[in-house]
Image: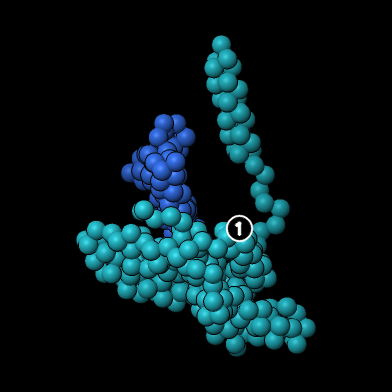
Amino acid sequence: MKRFAVICSALLFVGSLAAAMLELAPAAIDLRGPVAAHLAASGVSHPVTAVLLNYRGYDTLLEIAVLLLALLAILAVVGEPGAARPAPAHPVLQTLARLATPLMIVVAVYLLWAGAFRPGGAFQAGAVLAAAGVLLHLAGLLPGWQTPRLRLRLGLAGGFALFLAVAGGLLAQGTLLQYPPALAGGLILLIESGLTLSLALTLAGLFLFLSRDEVAP
Amino acid sequence: MTLAFDLLLALALLWSAWRTLAAPRLDRAIVLFIAFGLLMALAWARLAAPDIGLAEAAIGAGLTGALLLDAYGVLQRRRDRP
């Protein structure tokens, strides 16, 4: 009886959700026209990248800050354990990881470059680089990370700092993150390169700082 | 043809989501979650949003899956060694 009531109410909920979806009012404002109209001045030819890095640049700036804060919180939570030696994996897996890593780096650079004119960009490139780091760690080729030293700290904060420096430099013109159209393409590529490196280190850090826990005894 | 593919994709998404929640063993649930993430990436690509599809495949399925598997491994070792 109870199960029957649960199934009935769940079906009712699904039905009302579907009905709401079908009766969805059209969006009050349509931004596709303005986005397409100003694409030439944005420095890139892919609308998603133009929105992320140019029209709504400060959203991306704050997103990077949030990711950095999340990593800082993780660093604060995991204390100060001893060095973690990863258990050496099967030789086949190690060889595969060694072969796959250069390919993943090439794919990441391609995604970064392709972001200007087709789907891709800093987030995807950073995620692929981070995945390469995690793969190397799982294969036992890359030890887990200790408390970050200066070089790693610079790498982690570099993308955000670069983005902030560009924003601060452009503040002289009066508006935050309003690129001059002639320089927009180069500035976006510069910011995205920094972001790719920092995002890769941050995302890999989520894994490598946490996984320094006990390994096989 | 594409309609059949879309219907199949939608069904597979619902089925894998249900199996993920209902799987009795944690390791199976994690692997099913990764499969669900990859199907979700395909669905985003079919919805003409390849940017989100790429991010979903790399972060949603890849990195989250690896983190979950790592957490599962730590839990297993703690259980084996009280």
Which chain is indicated by disc 1? A
Q: Residue at x 33, y 59 (%)?
A: A87
Estimate the x, y position of residue A59 in percent, counting from the top left: 66, 66
Q: Amino acid at mark 1?
A: Val
Q: Which chain is cyan?
A: A
Residue identifier under label 1: A77
**Secondary element type, mark 1:** helix
Q: Quick check: A126 left or right of A35?
A: left
Nearer to me, A189 or A38 = A189
Asked whether residue A195 appears in the rendered view, the answer is no
Estimate the x, y position of residue A97 in percent, counting from the top left: 29, 65
Nearer to me, A99 or A121 = A99
Number of marks drawn: 1
Q: Is residue A19 above or below residue A46?
A: above
The color chain B is rendered in: blue
Residue farthest toward the right in the current orientation of the protein: A174
Q: Residue at x 65, y 86 (%)?
A: A180
Mark 1, Cα crowd under 10 Å, few <14 / some 14-19 / many 20+, is few
Q: Quadrant of the N terminus of chain A?
A: top right
Residue farthest toward the left in the current orientation of the protein: A92
Estimate the x, y position of residue A211 in percent, counting from the top left: 46, 58
Q: Residue at x 55, y 63 (%)?
A: A80
Asked whether residue A102 appears in the rendered view, the answer is yes
Estimate the x, y position of residue A174 in percent, counting from the top left: 78, 83
Q: Residue at x 43, y 52 (%)?
A: B70
Give the colour scheme shown: by chain
Nearer to me, A141 or A191 = A141
